[in-house]
Image (spheres, rainbow, N blue to C red):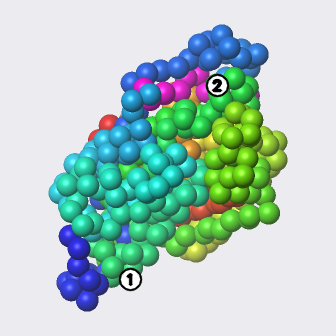
Amino acid sequence: MNVSSAELPQVRGTAAVVTGVGAHLPSRRVTNDELCTRLDSSDEWIRERIGIQERRRADASVSTGDLALEAARRAMRSAGATDVDALVLATTTPDHHCPATAPAVAHRLGLRDAVAFDVTAGCAGFVHASAVAAGLISAGSARRVLVVGAETMSAIIDSDDRSTAPLFGDGAGAMVLEAGPEGHDGCLGPFAWGSDGSLADAIVIPAGGARQRDRRDTAPAGDFFVHMRGNEVFRHAVRRMSQAARDAVTAAGWTLDEVDRLIVHQANGRIGASVADALGIPPERTPSNIAHVGNTAAASVPLLLAHAADDGRLKPGHRVLVVAFGSGLAWAATTLVWPPGITAEL
């Protein structure tokens, strides 16, 4: 519905409250053994170094928008919602350079004239998009916002690159946020977020954009895929996520000892474990799904929230700390108390 903020009725509060979550994964599983038929690696090395056994791959006919659409539908069913005022889509792999993918997803959902736009912050994108959605709600510009993280990482990964091919998977997750009273279970807490553009080339696709348009026909084929300086990214990811997590917990008036569940971006198994260790949060309070879905970039956080809520690792009343890190370099963290009555749609 396309209305001005002046026409919106008064709401009870200014907080953004989680009312539904959904997830969608492609059906095709790609095991380490399958990848290693063309990589100089092994199932044992991949499991030990990055903690992944398999990842999902979308068929060539399936786009990021297709994955986003299904996750969005499921989140709306979870929330019992038939309409939203805005859709914010976090992705690194849009269907096209132009236009944004979100408006097409909104159209396919039947959200006529809804505000819809993409957010690009790499693997931190979903938490950044949630902060934007919470701001829309707080400002009175929207009452209900659908936030989606969706990626077809297989479209931008060199299948012969040992440093990236085993790492990334495809998938989508979504969350519905609605205006509600401050202090309500499900309210997103203050956000701690930022970026450091001095390290923008630590995770980069060198070719295909405006920066190297003069080399469009001469750039090596590999420059159209993701390049990553893994060791450098590891160090910054652990440091930035740990600090953002501490800042978000402090802003929420909590202590780290009070955190029941740490939802950390599933970058790789060692990064997640290192962040949890730096924060003093034990493994039993740190759910993970990377072993079976891989690093799904902007889809990582909502997928993990949905999976943990579905299988009982995330329960009503749990104090949840969410933190992510990605290209840019960008990072973000927030908190919430997991609300009752949510059934994750998978």
Q: At x 59% / y 37%, what residue is drawn? A: 156
x and y percentages locating residue 39 in the rendered image: 71, 17
Q: At x 32% / y 45%, what residue is drawn? A: 69
Q: Quadrant of the C terminus?
A: top left
x and y percentages locating residue 52 in the rendered image: 61, 27
Q: Nearer the viewer, residue 233 or 153?
A: 153
Q: Residue type at mark 2? A: Ser
Q: Nearer the viewer, residue 93 or 144?
A: 93
| Mark in front: 2 vs 1 | 2
The residues colored magenta run 48-59
Q: Which mark is residue 148?
A: none
Instruction: Residue 110: say if magenta.
Output: no
x and y percentages locating residue 38 in the rendered image: 68, 14
x and y percentages locating residue 117 in the rendered image: 41, 63
Q: Is residue 299 visible?
A: no
Q: Secondary structure at mark 1?
A: loop
Instruction: Residue 49: say if magenta.
Output: yes
Q: Quadrant of the N terminus?
A: bottom left
Q: Which mark is residue 139?
A: 1
| 2 or 1: tag closer to the N-terminus | 1
Q: Residue type at mark 1? A: Ala
Residue 100 falls left or right of residue 192: left
Q: Nearer the viewer, residue 193 or 287?
A: 193
Q: Which mark is residue 159?
A: 2
Q: Is residue 197 visible?
A: yes
Crowd band around label 1 with a 10 angstrom C-alpha radius: few (<14), some (14–19), many (20+): few
Q: At x 52% / y 73%, what residue is drawn? A: 190
Residue 151 falls left or right of residue 138: right
Crowd band around label 2 with a 10 angstrom C-alpha radius: few (<14), some (14–19), many (20+): some
